[in-house]
Image: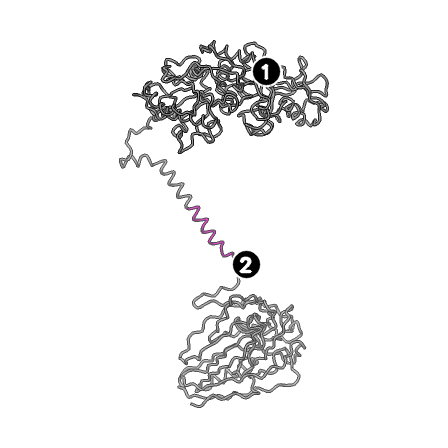
Amino acid sequence: MPGPEQPREQDAPNGGWPPAGGGAQEGAGPTGADQETVRVPVDGSAPTQRVEWPPAPPTPAAGSEPAARDRPAEAPDPAPDKTERVDVDTELVDIELVGTGKTDQGTSEAGETDTGTNDPGTSGTGKIDPGTPGTGTSDPGTSGTGTDDAGTSGTGKTDPGTPDTGKSDPGTSDTEKTPTGTTGADEAKADTELTERPTDQHTVRYQQPVRIDNATARLDPATLRMKRPEPSWPPPEPPRAMPVRVLPAQPAPSGGQTPSGGQTLPQSPAPERQGPVPPAPRPRPGDTGPQPPVPPSAGEQPAPPDQGEPAPAGRPRRRRRLVLGAVALVVVAGLAVGAAVWGKPVARRFGLLSADASTAAPPPPVEAKQAIRGVGSDAPAPTKAGVARALQQPLANPDLAKLAGVVLDPATGEVLWEQSPTEQIVPASTNKILTVAAALLALDPQARFTTRVVAGPDPETIVLVGGGDPTIASGKDSLYPGAARLTDLAAQVKPHLTGPVKRVLVDNSRYAEPWPAGDTWDPRDVAGGSITPITPVMLDGGRRMPLNKDAPRYQDAAGQTATELAEALGATGASVVAGSAPSGAKVLGEVRSPTVQQLVETALMISDNVLAETLAKEVAKARGKETTFANATAAVRETLTENGFDLTGTTTVDGSGLGLANRLNARVLSEILAVAAAPDGSPKADARTAKLRPLLRGLPVAGAPGGTLGGGRYRAGEAAAQGRGWVRAKTGTLSEGKQVNSLSGVVLDRDNRLLVFALVSNGSQMEQGRAALDVITSALRGCGCQG
């Protein structure tokens, strides 16, 4: 087979000169020439059909002059087409492969038009004249024939009935060059010749793509590469072209003239596109420039022509969801109604419900039972021999020095063990047991002490009247549960002030003396944090650091309270002096202390000396005595004696046990505790028991934080660990003078029998004496003590 014949260099498409632009071009170009082809004999009887690709470009109007900006620039020499002879029994087929961006002006058959330069990423079609065949009609997917700005995808302007002039849409910036296609007459003639003569040849033409400019390749449409087709007959049905939205034609002016003054061309339908349609390039990942429209894939139905504003895509789906939801609600409602109306009869019909069914009676109420119950008297009782055996080894510890003690059963009052029970020894802080017991017996356990501020003798003076409460909190937090706050007192006073406060009087007349006579207390104990002069009004027990129970105390706690009250009222610098409230003075504000029961519990739990002394004075006041220390201690003894306790030989000089001159025996301590711990219903439980019961609540728990038995006592792994959490007792320690260690309280033995003990050691070292006492009480915890 002879090789392909190369077209001549000056060959151009039929009717392809001058380029499209709307008028005559200066300097006529070469006329169209027939392309040399190789002819292949085929069966003459085969049907003939002409297939064109791409469609013919528009034909310029005769006599029109193109605008200067539309004149084509000098194009490079077109690359020669390659024509190859193929033996096929088919019609004349013309296939053109289009490169990206620019295409060559090669040889075309009748009616073919090679496209010129196209702006990257555009798919504009310039002007479209649907009424004139072969006059510039463009179809989507082909290269644009007019000027189109990068990023646009419109079709430019549509001017039906007007010859295509190649002008671009206003607002575009790039100019494209479009060769002129064949005229309608030429194309009709070519069609006539191809139809009349027998088809004895088949021409296949391939156009060689040009090199791609790498600088613009990123924005150019993807290059369409096609393999050499295998001739087949009949050819496959070409895919349908993407529909193009065409605006309605504008009516031509009367007289057959166009708006530009040209002649109105006869209207005819646009030629239908035939032949295979190359797929449009798909957007590539990373492209940021405008992308050409993507045609539908194979098998995909094209979108119908635009019929107005399209409905949102998600609206039908949302409407279907609403409909389904409404149907579901109706179904559920119907089921509910059906169950309510026909549920019972249906259940009876199938034997699921008896005919005489009725609502069952509610179950009887559950009887509440206490999770924590008081210790009863039904547990096995220990024996003296059993207790003596359990204590034999702990009592042999020489660290106990001089020990006096008693162990008894509060349910029966039987003494199980005792040693020097009536010897008068220094009790240290266990002396508080006598003081708080007298307070519980002499005072209303729910009584509170009131601190007031009243008007002074002049408008610039107020009077702070102490009511027996040393627990008023200077801040938000306090060591004393339920304590009143100074800020609350000041807030009550402020609205009653008619002017600035320049003087605050402190009325301490409730208590007769703040310090005991003689050398009962050591003045150094004030700075040491043990005590302060006892006055009927204080902040935080007179502590300089409110939340530290061992903090140093103020020498004049009442005066400090008055000073801080003045500051809270905004009268900083006001003078503070002792004085008395005028008779019948107006009350400007008042706050109340915790209850007597709460004060008793706190005094035992943290061994607060100030609270104990205050309670002793309140007992004296309740008994109608002057509130001196001597009268206070005497009132305590009298109260206890009147309630059946034997205090023979007992000597007390204060209510806290801080004085070294205090003397008492272990028996009185054990008897007071035994009455408080007597089980309900036991022979030893009486009227005193109910009053003294709160005393047990104030006893510190072995190993628990917050009390005097916490910290390093009853630690795990030590000899006394057995009593951790089971022993509750009041501690007492004096590190100087007599060197006293004492421990008096209760313990539950191994058989759940409650035992009372009172242990006082004189002459023992603090740490060693404490540890020895802890071991004794732990031995009682582990004792069955029945044999």
Which residue corresponds to the image point at 41% horizontal and 28% vertical from the top-left? Answer: 725
Of the two numbered discs 2 and 1 on the same chain, state the one appearing first in sequence: 2
What range of the chain is rendered magenta? 308-327
Task: Name the dominant secondary structure of the magenta segment.
Answer: helix
- Picture quadrant of residue 391: top left
The answer to whether 98 appears left or right of 584 in the picture is: left
Residue, disc 2 = 309
Element at label 2:
loop
* Relative image position of residue 16 (x, y in whole percent): 58, 82
- Circle 2 or circle 1, nearest the eye: 1
Amino acid type at circle 2 is: Glu
Q: What element carries label 1?
A: loop
Query: For the residue marked with disc 1, what is the amino acid?
Result: Gly
Q: Is mark 2 in CB contact (under 8 Å) with mark 1?
A: no
Q: Any magenta on residue 311?
A: yes
- The label shown at residue 494 is none
Say above or below: 395 vs 645. Answer: below
Q: Where is residue 694 in the image (x, y as percent from the top left)?
A: 46, 19
In terms of image quadrants, where is residue 417?
A: top left
Q: Name the residue under label 1.
A: 518
Task: Specify the quadrant of the image occupied by residue 260.
Answer: bottom right
User: How many labels were placed on the picture?
Assistant: 2
On-image quarter of the C terminus: top left
Apparent side of residue 31 relative to residue 328 in the rendered image (left or right): right
Quadrant where the image shows the N terminus: bottom left
Badge 2: residue crowd in 10 Å (few <14, some 14–19, many ≥20): few
Residue 210: % across, % down:
54, 80
Q: Does the magenta stretch include residue 597?
A: no
Q: Residue at x 62, y 75 (%)?
A: 165
